[in-house]
Image (cartoon, rainbow, N blue to C red):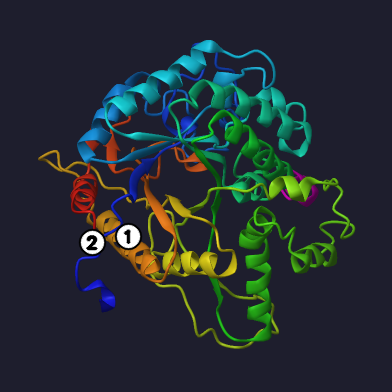
Amino acid sequence: MKGLAQMFKFPDNFVWGVATSSFQIEGAVDVDGRSESIWDRLCKRPGAIADNTNGDVACDHYNRWPEDVKIMSDMGVGAYRFSVAWPRIIPTGRGATNQKGIDFYSRLVDGLLEAGIDPCVTLYHWDLPQILEDQGGWTNRDTAYAFADYTETISRALGDRVKTWVTINEPWCISVLGYINGEHAPGIKNDWPKALSAAHHVMLGHGLAVPIIRDNVPDGEVGITVNLVPNEPASQSGADRDACRHFDGFFNRWYLDPVFGRGYPADRVADLVKAGEIPSSDLPFLHKGDLETIAADSDFLGINYYSRAVIRDEKAENNDPPDVVSTKNETDMGWEVWPLGLEQILVRLKDDYNPKAIQVTENGCAYATAPNADGIVEDTERIAYFDGHIRACAKAIEQGVPLTAYYAWSLLDNFEWAFGYEKRFGLVYVDYDTLDRTPKQSAHWYRDLIQKGGI
């Protein structure tokens, strides 16, 4: 079956889904008791969002969710991964539950199940209640315990119907984009101590949440989602290979190793000390028992994959010419289209970490295609992207990777964080003036693939 020349049939129980997140699509930020989130606050900062927009309306999914469920049903997807907005459930971060918030997600879950779509809930996709940020946010260890309380509340409310749970989405983005680059909320720049403590407390929150979900949803499954970037040195020079190790250590291994009981990578800790980004290898945020908590036994590992990285040490003395270069095939995000990287990272996870199961919880691309005169959105580039990456999944399964699910990102064009509404990832086109939805050709292609169960 070299090159998948024949039809590759995915397992009968393979999950085909689509994914979104609360802040990116819901809107209704100040109704039914929802409190301000850190992203609501960041959107008010001049220059923080490329097009000076916000999530106040977004796709208005809060009011239009029945239409969106109908679209998913027409696509034939078997599962929908969405996130719950913490500020809707516990507006004060800790304490009293907002029943109207619970009721919204309960209606959504019931609507999905009636349509034959399994709900997959992500507990945290970045919209922390601002009131907790005012107390230090994820740099405050207590936020991990507040997250555990929130997990208790929402898993009790929905656990009779929701059987798949993701604790945290992309801890790398929370820490690095939130505290080093400053592009994401809370918008802090170049603060390694805060970035590292935030990352640790996010991971601690994951570990605390796992047994809570097990207790409240004994027939469910739980995991964490990490965004991974396969990487290779631009040349075989010692400088490029060390730069690649450095990149991999913080982008990938810093989050994978603790989840799988290995603690933080010693080589990357040494890098941080050498660079003066932390004073010593004694990580001040690390308390006794934390690593055991973080390594709580999970049912699956969720991965989000978009592109690879070719790593070059840019120091002047690094004179070796690169023998690996990025292609010019890029999405509107400037990310290289590299399906092979998904196959590579899946096989690496099997070989290096041996998870019970893996789910691709996000994979997608941004292209600015709009309806033509006939109202058709001909997004051929997106179809090619999905085709290549789903083939990569098939090749990984052939190599023994325990891949059980694939969620396309994203169901709808939406608020793309610091880019605002400039980047369109959706299988469904959203007219932001009218909020009308138009399934793109990629949505029809995905429907056909699901019906065939193979590629």
Left/right of residue 16 with respect to residue 54 in the rendered view: left
| Mark number displayed over residue 390 | 1
Q: Quadrant of residue 317?
A: bottom right
Residue found at x 46% / y 57%: 305
SS for tag 1?
A: helix
Q: Secondary structure at mark 2?
A: loop
> In x, y percent, where is residue 24?
45, 34
The answer to whether residue 219 is left or right of residue 14 is right
Q: Quadrant of residue 381?
A: bottom left
Q: Position of residue 303 (x, y in %)?
A: 50, 53
Q: Main secondary structure of the magenta part?
A: helix
The answer to whether residue 411 is above or below residue 173 is above
- Mark 1: few, some, or many residues within 10 Å (few <14, many ≥20)? many
Q: Position of residue 284 (x, y in %)?
A: 87, 48
Looking at the rendered structure, which numbered label has been put on residue 149? none
Please, what is the three-letter code of the amino acid marked with disc 2?
Answer: Ile
Q: Are marks 2 and 1 in contact (CB under 8 Å)?
A: yes
Which quadrant would the N terminus be assigned to in this image? Answer: bottom left
- Using the image, determine if residue 352 lies above or below residue 420: below
Residue 241: percent from the left, percent from the top? 64, 79
Can residue 167 be seen in the rendering of this structure? yes
Q: Residues within 10 Å of mark 2 (few under 14, many from 20)?
A: some
Q: Furthest-left residue in view?
A: 374
Q: Is residue 214 magenta?
A: no
Q: Magenta stretch?
A: 189-197
Between 452 and 265, the one lying in front of the other is 452
Question: Camera-side residue: 354 or 60?
Answer: 354
Residue at image mark 2? 455
- Tell me the kind of residue under disc 1: Ile
